[in-house]
Every structure is written in structure tokens, then in C-alpha cells.
Amino acid sequence: MFYINGNRIGTDILTPGWTHYRKRVQYQTYDVTPYVRTGENCFAAVLGNLWWSGDVGFRGIPQFSADPLRFIMQLHLQYDDGTSEILKSDERWKAHISPIVENSIYDGETYDARLEVAGWNMPGLSDKEWTAVDEFDEEWGTLVAEQLEPIKITREIKPVSVNEIEPGRFIFDMGQNMAGWVKLLVKGEKGTVVTLRFAEILNDDGSLKTEPLRSAKATDRYILKGEGLEEWEPAFTYHGFQFVEVTGYPGEPAPESIVGKVFHTDAPVLGKIETSNTLINKLAHNIFWGQIGNMHSVVTDCPQRDERMGWTGDAQIFAATAFYNMDMSLMFRKYLRDIRDSQLPNGEVTNFAPDAFSMYGAGPGWADAVVIVPWKTFLFTGDTSIIRENFESMLAWHNSVMEKSENNLFERGGFGDWVSVEKTPPEPIGSAYYYYSTKLLAKMAGVIGKTEEANRLQQLSDDIRLAFNNKHLKENKQYWADTQTAYLLPLSFGIPSSEDQPAIVANLVENIHDRDVHVSTGFLGTQYILPVLSDNKQHELANELVTTRSYPSWGYMIEQGATTIWELWNSDKQGAKMNSRNHYAYGTVGEWLFGYLGGIRIDENYPGFKKFEINPQPAGDLEWVKCSYNSPYGSIISNWKKTHKQFILEIEVPANTSATITIPAIDIKNVKEGNKQLGENPNFDNLVFKHGALQLDVKAGKFEFTSVLE
């Protein structure tokens, strides 16, 4: 935190953010003109451990440095006479122990208000008792401008209840699983210690259940100075929680004694979806809150326990859903730099990034993030620079996989279909992803004009596909295992032939019905189950899966009170060892909500929504859906409502774009735009009726289609 003449500069927190500090260190820039004055000025900063010298990832092992904290500043002054001057931090600065006596990302922060130095960040302070600083002259990483949106407080949450579970022990319920901290308001005697502990769930007796935090203490302490009403919030930690235990509070705290502060990397919100089904609305809410709870300079797996790492597998499966919710272009560009900075000399990609200590690479589905995340970013933005910037890194990783492959197969398991209900033998998953990433890499090589490389990779992907089907597709059209994921990965990646695909889909459908219409997938398979069904004439079955309320399902989480996405389908029944209540991986279903129920879909031939699809697919008892997405060209809207007699679709196509629209219909004559027949509007082209739907190309504008269904 930086101050000029007592004024806090900027509203961002947890700066400079988390990078591979040995390779890259971010700096922030601010216009400080309003705060600099003629005469004496005071420049001051408060430093904390954060990811730099905290034991991130593996307790007791600082990921980057156990050395003292560091600070660097330059002030660029432009004078009225046209001259300029640069002032910088140097050996003349002084240091003093702050009231923050302890701070840790995992363990929390302790603040002793009695140690506050009056006027410490104002001109005129006597610094005779302050310590001289050491000027650090060793190079440590490249200084780069901040690469993504800053972390900011975006919401405040008031507790929904407070209960005294035993004398002096109060439990506040925030009503929402969140990531951030709380502001404390308290009045009491000097030296009083108020302790705040955080957790996602409670024990049966109403006390905090802290076992899922593992070794993370998740505890803040505030020691009062005894001067009227005191307000305090931390600076160098964050917690994942719904419940706050407060002890040591003088008297009985009121609900307003704490205020929840939600913060995350402040990427713009792009998408919104609302439906007539309350369960689906809650699911969309939970997915979004799971996303913002895991965006703190890095896309992390969870915000509460002693982990919070940028796992590559989680990031790649969630990338499309993340983009539907928010503009992830800067966040993923920075994350891909973290992946490159952490990449091993042999080209292998680490399990998470930033990663300063791994000696081995990640397995299938995790390492593939180096290819899949740039591809998804390109599709949503149309920006080819994301491919150019990462192509050599992608190719280096792909070469490392080729070296380990045999007979065009990469039979490596890694984490497999992580935390699935039904275990899928993992080794063929490596070959499936080998095909998928090779195919995507061929496409990206073509996009940036590397034609020879594109042809080589396309031929290799064809060879992998042939080898995969020869080895893993059985005569009964089952793949290597009769599991949902063993069908879904090949179907989604495009491995089966068109002749075999219907029988493979039938086997998948049979498996789902054998499980009484429930998912059994893990992290990898879940992303694909609903799109694969909807794309293969099983849309109603997909809707049944997403709206069921019994285990295992998204509805089951919601029925048990979830306000974010769980790490496990049955987190309520499992032990504490690995059991996060805020883990976005199973939230990959968000891509289906926007793309199939809402109908807003990318056309791969026109990335960045230059041309796109609006193809809403009603299902079950859904009466209406309102879906919007703020594309690079402007707002896309797809709102529909359905009765037993008609289907009404309101759309908006931004300027300089076009869209292919698909509308449920019984024939062309029964579809109108406004009160006119479609052929009367010059904005419509290529009208085609087939399979109970009308398809047409639409130019920019706002339109309302009405289709009479009987």
C-alpha cells in the first residue's frame, strides 16, 4: 500500500500480484498529481509477505524468497516550465515495524493498533528512531507493467445472521460463500484482542468446521488502541468463507459489526443469463461466484485452504465458461505468461503456474492448458497475438509429448478424470488429449500463417485419430471403458468416424440412463457431457441432467445450500482432507447455459464474434430465457419465450457483425419478424428449413421473430 502525504494511492489491493518473480515482477502506475504539493512531501509504503515470501503451495517452503521485503518507486515530475525530474526510492528511505505484526495468505493477519505511529505517512515526522534501509542491487526478475486488471473490492456483503453459540463466541453467517476479508467495527478498552476465524461450513453444533482448511489458520486478530469506535480490515491476506467466528469482542456484536469485502481481479463482466427455472438461475449464480472467488492475479483452484494454486487443468476446462461470464483476455494472457515462465527446460508444462520449484511436468488434461487456453482466448477475442505470443511455448510442449509417444499414442494417465464418481482408466485420456491438442495446434499454426507447420500437425492428428480408434474402439462401439468420460472425450474432440458416432452416442445415453439420469464424470468429462448430448439430438436428456436434484448433480449441491460450486459432487458427505466448497471446475456447465439454453455461440470461422450463432434450444418446462453477452463488437442479446402455441425470439446483433439464427418452427410460412414475412426484410439471407427449425443469416440490428408452433 502506497501513500503520498497521508493519501492512499489507488484502490487496488494485493499488489503487485503473483507472478514467477524470478522471471517477471509487475509494477503499478498511478497519476498522483492531486496528492503532490509544493514544499515538503511524504512518500510512504506498507509492505507485506503475500506470495513473495509466504509459504505458498507447500507449507514451510517460500516459493520465491525468504529474503526481506522489497519496494521500488519512481516519481516522474513534469514542471510548468517544461522541465522534468525523476525521484526514486534509494538509501535515504527509512523503515519502521508496522502495526501489522503477522501476515500470511493462508494464516491471516494480526494488527496491533497500539503500535500505530501518528503521522507516519505525513510530512514533518521525526524519523530519528527509524531504521536505515538496505539498497538492493541484485537483479531479480524483469520489471513489467501490470499485465491485467488490478484486484479490487467489488462488493460488500452484510451478514444475514449472528448467533452466540457459547458465551463470548459469535458466529456470523454472510449468506454467501465468498473470497476476501471482513471489516471490523469495534469499541473497547486498549489491548483488547478480537479474533476472527473463517470457514466455509459449520459443525453440527454450530461451531466453525475448519478441518477442510487443512493447515491454513485463516485467522485475523485486531488489538484495540482504545480510542472510540475503531474500524479495521486486513491488507495482506484473504480468506474463502461463508462463516466468521468472532471472539474477544467487547460486549455483544451487532450484525453490522462486520462487513464482508469481496475482491478479485476486476475483469469486466460480459455475460448474463436468467431463466424461468430457479434451479438453473442458482446454478448460474454459483458458477459466477466460484469464478470471482478464484481470480486473485491467478486463476486458482480454491480460495480457502492451504493451496490456492493456479492449476492448469482447472483453467483449461473452465476457460470457455469463464469467458462467457467475464472478459478474461488480460487475465489469461498473464496466466499464459506464468505458464511460459514456469515451463521446464525440456518443454514440459507444470501442474500449476506460477511455479518456481517443480522438477517434473503435468499430465494430460493439465499440461494441455498451454494449447487450449490460447485457443479459447482466440475464439472469444479474435486476437491472433495470443497465438503468436505462445506458439513457441506450445510447440516446445508438444514436442516433449511427441518424444514420449509411441505409435502415435501418448498413453499417460496423470490425474485422469479427477474426482469422478465413476473411475475411467486414465492412460487413453492422454492419447485423446494428444489428438485434441495436436488438432488445435494445427489450426492455430494455420491462423498465423505457418502453413507447413499446420500441414504437418494436421497429418499427425489424423494419424493419432486412426491409431486411437484402432486401439481403443471396440466392436460394440464402446471405447476403452464403459464410462461417460470414455465416450465424451472422443466424441467432443472429434475422434469417432461419422459412421460410428451414432452407436457411440447410444452407448453414452444408455450409460446415463443406467445411472438413473445422473452424471458420473470428473473434472475432464463434465465439461463435455451436456454439449455432446445437445449436439447429438439428446438435448432433453442434457436438460434432465442439469435440473436433477439428487446426487450426483449440480442440483444436489444447491439443495444442500451451496452458493458456489463444490470440488466434489458430494462434498457434504466426504471428509475434510480435500474438500473445497468453492472450486469452479464443475462449473464448466456454464458454457452450455449460455451456448445452448441462451443460444449465443461462437462461429469458429469468425472468431471474436465477427459472425456468430444464435441457436436457443428450449427444453423441459422452460418458459423463457434472457441471455446477453458483451462481445468485442458490442452487446449480443438472445431473449426467448415459449408457449405451447408459439416461440418468440428477441435478438440484437451488434454493428459490423452478422449472425446465423436458428428458430424452432413447423415451416417457413409460420415465422415472422415483427408483422412481416421474412422474405420482405433485406437484412435476412439464406433461409433454410430443416429438422423442425428455420435457419437464416441476419445482419446487424434488433429483431423480434415469432414462430407459430401449431
Image (tube, rainbow, N blue to C red):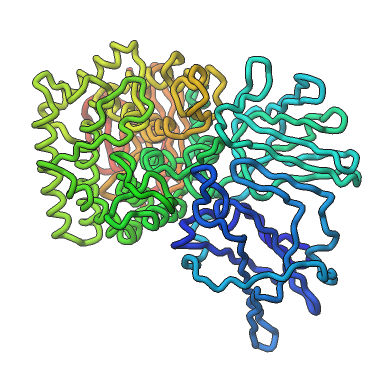
List x then y, in percent, for residue 453. Answer: 16, 58
Can residue 609 be seen from the camera position used here? Answer: no
Quadrant for residue 507, please give it.
top left
Q: Residue at x 44, y 40 (%)?
A: 637
Q: Residue at x 40, y 33 (%)?
A: 588
Q: Is residue 431 placed above or below 561 in the rendered structure?
A: below
Can residue 69 be seen from the camera position used here? Answer: yes
List x then y, in percent, for residue 208. Answer: 66, 25
Report the side of 326 relative to 360 (left or right): right
Quadrant for residue 508, please give it.
top left
Q: Is residue 562 placed above or below 7 in the rendered structure?
A: above
| Nearer the observer, 272 or 128 | 128
| Nearer the observer, 375 or 608 | 375
Q: Residue at x 39, y 35 (%)?
A: 591
Q: Residue at x 64, y 76 (%)?
A: 88
| Nearer the observer, 163 or 255 | 163
| Nearer the observer, 96 or 433 | 96
Report the side of 630 relative to 444 (left or right): right
